[in-house]
C-alpha cells in the first residue's frame, strides 16, 4: 500500500509539473519579443530622413492578456543622427491617425531634435498596419443612410429624425465589431508602454497633437514612472471629458469663422464676398441659400467651413464659397483671375478644374459614410460615459442659433449619443509628480481643439507649462506652423530641459498674407509679446504635415 501511495503521489506530482507552464505569466509572449526592423510599407515624404519599420504583437485586452486574438501594431523609427538622448514617440491625433509616416515627416521638420532622439511612430491599434490597411472600419448598410435634402436648420421632426439616422447606424455598426471594446486609450497606452520596454528605454518622451494630447496625458497618468518629457500640442482637456472637445467644435469653429475667416475673405476677394465682414456673412448666407433653392443639401455647403485648421482647409472653404456665391448671383462659377491654388484644390478634392466646379459637383463629392473609422468612434465614445441622444438634441437647439455654421448639425450627428457600451476601464488624471515634465502649446483661434479646453487642463494640473499662441488660426503649432517662437520654446525644452511656466508667442500671418491681423480672443497677451516675427519659410514637407493634421482631426 505504501508503494502504491508513493506511485500515486509521483503521478500527481508529475501532473502538476506538466500543467505548470499554463500558470506562467501570460504577458511573457509579448514582453519577450524582439523588434525586427526592416523596410516600411510607406514611401517617406520628400525631405524626411531615412526610416525603418517593424510590427509588434499586443494582446487584444491588457486586462486579460490570454483572452483573445492578438493584435499587431506598426512602428517606425527615424534614428537619432547625433548624440542620442532617447526616443520621442509621436502621435498625430484623430482618434485614428497613423503615426508611422507622420513621425518620420516631423523628424524632417525638426532635424536638431532628431539629432538627439530616435523619432518613433506608432499606428495605434485599430488604425491598420500599413497605408493599404484601413484597419477597424464600421460598415454602415446603404439602407441606413439618410436620404433627401438634409438641412440641419430644418427643425421639423422628419428632418431631425433623418439627421439622427446616420449617427445611430454608425454607433451600431461600430459596436457590432468584436474589437470595438478593446480599441480605447487605456489599451493603446499599454501598447505604448510595451513599445517602450521592447525598445529598452526606461522612459518614453512624447509629442502629441490634438487627440494625441489626450493619449499622451493618459499614458503619463497610467505610467508616471516611465514618462519623460511630454509636449501636448493643440490640446483637448485631458483632465476632463474627451467628448467635451468635440462638443465645443461649433463654438470654436464659429469664432474663427467670424473673427478671422470672414475678414480675411474681404481683404482678398471683396469683389465676390463684399468689403466688410457683415457683407461677407450675408453673401455666405446667400450662397448657402442657393443649395436649398436648387434641391441640394445645405449641410454639404456647411461642411466645407467646419474645422478649417490648415491653409488647405481655408482654400477649400473659399473655393466652395466663391463657386456658390457666384452661382447664387448668376455669374460664372470661378473668376479665371483667382490664384492657381484654387485650380489645384479643385482638381484634388472634386476631380475637376476650378472653372468647371459647380454646387452640384460639390454635393456629389460628399463623403461616403458606408465605411467609417471604427477607431475614431470606439475611442471617442468608449473611453468615458456618453450622453444621450436627447442631451445632444438639446445641445443642437442651444448651439444652432449662436453658431449656425455647425451648431445646428453637430448635436444631431454625434454617434456617441447612441453608444450603449459602458467603459471597461477608468482613466486617471495627471498625477502631480509628472506635471514638471509636461508642456502644453495651444493656438488661440484653433477651430479643432479650443483654447479653453487646453487652459482648463492646465488649470487642473498645477505645474504644467503653457505656451499660448496669440491670433494663431491653424491646428498644430510646433514644427508645422513655421512659428520660430513656438519652435524655439519646444526645442529648448526637449534638448536642454528648460521649460517655460507660462508664456505667450505671437502668431504668424494667415494664408496669402505677410501681416498678422490681431483679433479679440481668450489670450490676454502683454503688448511686449506682440512684436512681429518672420515665419520660417514653408516647404512641401511642412505643408503636407500641416494638411494631414487638419484632415485627420477634422469633422468634415
Image: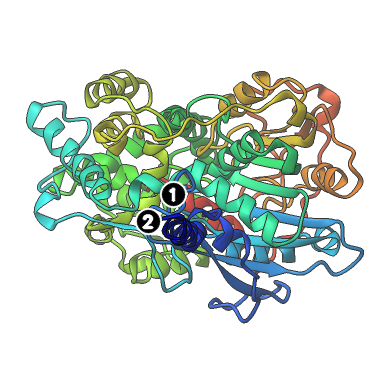
Label 2 secondary element: loop
Label 1 secondary element: loop
The percent position of residue 339, horizontal first and vertical second, equals 52, 63
Task: Give the quarter of the image for residue 502.
Answer: top right
| Disc on res. 38 | none
Name the residue carrying label 1: 61
Q: In the image, what residue occupies the spot 45% across and 62% down? A: 7
Name the residue carrying label 2: 68
Mark 1 or mark 2, earlier in chain: 1
The percent position of residue 344, horizontal first and vertical second, equals 47, 69
Residue occupying the far bottom of the picture: 39
The percent position of residue 122, horizontal first and vertical second, equals 58, 60
Callout 1: few (<14), some (14-19), or many (20+) C-alpha neighbours within 10 Å? many
| Residue 429 in the image: above or below residue 73 | above
Q: Contact (CB < 8 A) between labels 1 and 2?
A: yes
Image quarter in which the N terminus is found: bottom left
| Residue 400 in the image: above or below residue 375 | above
Mark 1 and mark 2: span between their CA atoms? 7 Å
| Residue 187 in the image: above or below residue 452 | below
Residues 440 and 178: in front is 178
Res. 502 visible in picture: yes
Q: In the image, what residue occupies the spot 47% across and 52% down? A: 65
Callout 2: few (<14), some (14-19), or many (20+) C-alpha neighbours within 10 Å? few
Res. 305 visible in picture: no
Amino acid at each position: 500500500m505504501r508503494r502504491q501511495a508513493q506511485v500515486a503521489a509521483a503521478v500527481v506530482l508529475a501532473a502538476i509539473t506538466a500543467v505548470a507552464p499554463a500558470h506562467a505569466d501570460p504577458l511573457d509572449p509579448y514582453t519577450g519579443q524582439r523588434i525586427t526592423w526592416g523596410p516600411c510599407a510607406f514611401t517617406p515624404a520628400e525631405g524626411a530622413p531615412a526610416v525603418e519599420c517593424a510590427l509588434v504583437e499586443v494582446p487584444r485586452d491588457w486586462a486579460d492578456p490570454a483572452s483573445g486574438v492578438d493584435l499587431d501594431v506598426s512602428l517606425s523609427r527615424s534614428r537619432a543622427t547625433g548624440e542620442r538622448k532617447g526616443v520621442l514617440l509621436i502621435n498625430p491625433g484623430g482618434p485614428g491617425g497613423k503615426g508611422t509616416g507622420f513621425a518620420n515627416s516631423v523628424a524632417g521638420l525638426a532635424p536638431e531634435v532628431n539629432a538627439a532622439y530616435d523619432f518613433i511612430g506608432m499606428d495605434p491599434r485599430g488604425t491598420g498596419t500599413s497605408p493599404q490597411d484601413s484597419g477597424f472600419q464600421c460598415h454602415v448598410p446603404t439602407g441606413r443612410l439618410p436620404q433627401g435634402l438634409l438641412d440641419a436648420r430644418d427643425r421639423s421632426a422628419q428632418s431631425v429624425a433623418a439627421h439622427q439616422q446616420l449617427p445611430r447606424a454608425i454607433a451600431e455598426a461600430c459596436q457590432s465589431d468584436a474589437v470595438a471594446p478593446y480599441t480605447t486609450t487605456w489599451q493603446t497606452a499599454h501598447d505604448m508602454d510595451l513599445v517602450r520596454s521592447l525598445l529598452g528605454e526606461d522612459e518614453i518622451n512624447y509629442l502629441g497633437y490634438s487627440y494625441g494630447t489626450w493619449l499622451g496625458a493618459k499614458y503619463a497618468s497610467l505610467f508616471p514612472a516611465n514618462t519623460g518629457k511630454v509636449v501636448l500640442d493643440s490640446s483637448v482637456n485631458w483632465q476632463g471629458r474627451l467628448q467635451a472637445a468635440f462638443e465645443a467644435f461649433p463654438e470654436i469653429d464659429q469664432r474663427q469663422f467670424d473673427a478671422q475667416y470672414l475678414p480675411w475673405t474681404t481683404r482678398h476677394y471683396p469683389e465676390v464676398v463684399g468689403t466688410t465682414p457683415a457683407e461677407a456673412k450675408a453673401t455666405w448666407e446667400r450662397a448657402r441659400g442657393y443649395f436649398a433653392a436648387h434641391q441640394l443639401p445645405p449641410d454639404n455647403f456647411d461642411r466645407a467651413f467646419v474645422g478649417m485648421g490648415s491653409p488647405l482647409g481655408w482654400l477649400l472653404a473659399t473655393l466652395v464659397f466663391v463657386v456658390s456665391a457666384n452661382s447664387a448671383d448668376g455669374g460664372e462659377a470661378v473668376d479665371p483671375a483667382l490664384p492657381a491654388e484654387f485650380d489645384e484644390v479643385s482638381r484634388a478634392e472634386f476631380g475637376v478644374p476650378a472653372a468647371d466646379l459647380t454646387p452640384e459637383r460639390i454635393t456629389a463629392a460628399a463623403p461616403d459614410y458606408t465605411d467609417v473609422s471604427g477607431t475614431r468612434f470606439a475611442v471617442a465614445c468608449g473611453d468615458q460615459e456618453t450622453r444621450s441622444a436627447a442631451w445632444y438634441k438639446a445641445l443642437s437647439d442651444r448651439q444652432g442659433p449662436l453658431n449656425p455654421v455647425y451648431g445646428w448639425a453637430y448635436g444631431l450627428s454625434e454617434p456617441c449619443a447612441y453608444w450603449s457600451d459602458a467603459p471597461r476601464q477608468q482613466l486617471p488624471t495627471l498625477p502631480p509628480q509628472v506635471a514638471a515634465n509636461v508642456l502644453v502649446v495651444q493656438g488661440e483661434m484653433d477651430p479643432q481643439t479650443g483654447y479653453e479646453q487646453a487652459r482648463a487642463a492646465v488649470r487642473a494640473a498645477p505645474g504644467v507649462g503653457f505656451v499660448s499662441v496669440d491670433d494663431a488660426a491653424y491646428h498644430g503649432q510646433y514644427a508645422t506652423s513655421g512659428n520660430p517662437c513656438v519652435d524655439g520654446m519646444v526645442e529648448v525644452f526637449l534638448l536642454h530641459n528648460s521649460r517655460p511656466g507660462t508664456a505667450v508667442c505671437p502668431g504668424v500671418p494667415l494664408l496669402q498674407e505677410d501681416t498678422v491681423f490681431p483679433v479679440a480672443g481668450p489670450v490676454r497677451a502683454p503688448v511686449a509679446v506682440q512684436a512681429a516675427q518672420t515665419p520660417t519659410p514653408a516647404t512641401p514637407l511642412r505643408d503636407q504635415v500641416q494638411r494631414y493634421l487638419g484632415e485627420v482631426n477634422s469633422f468634415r
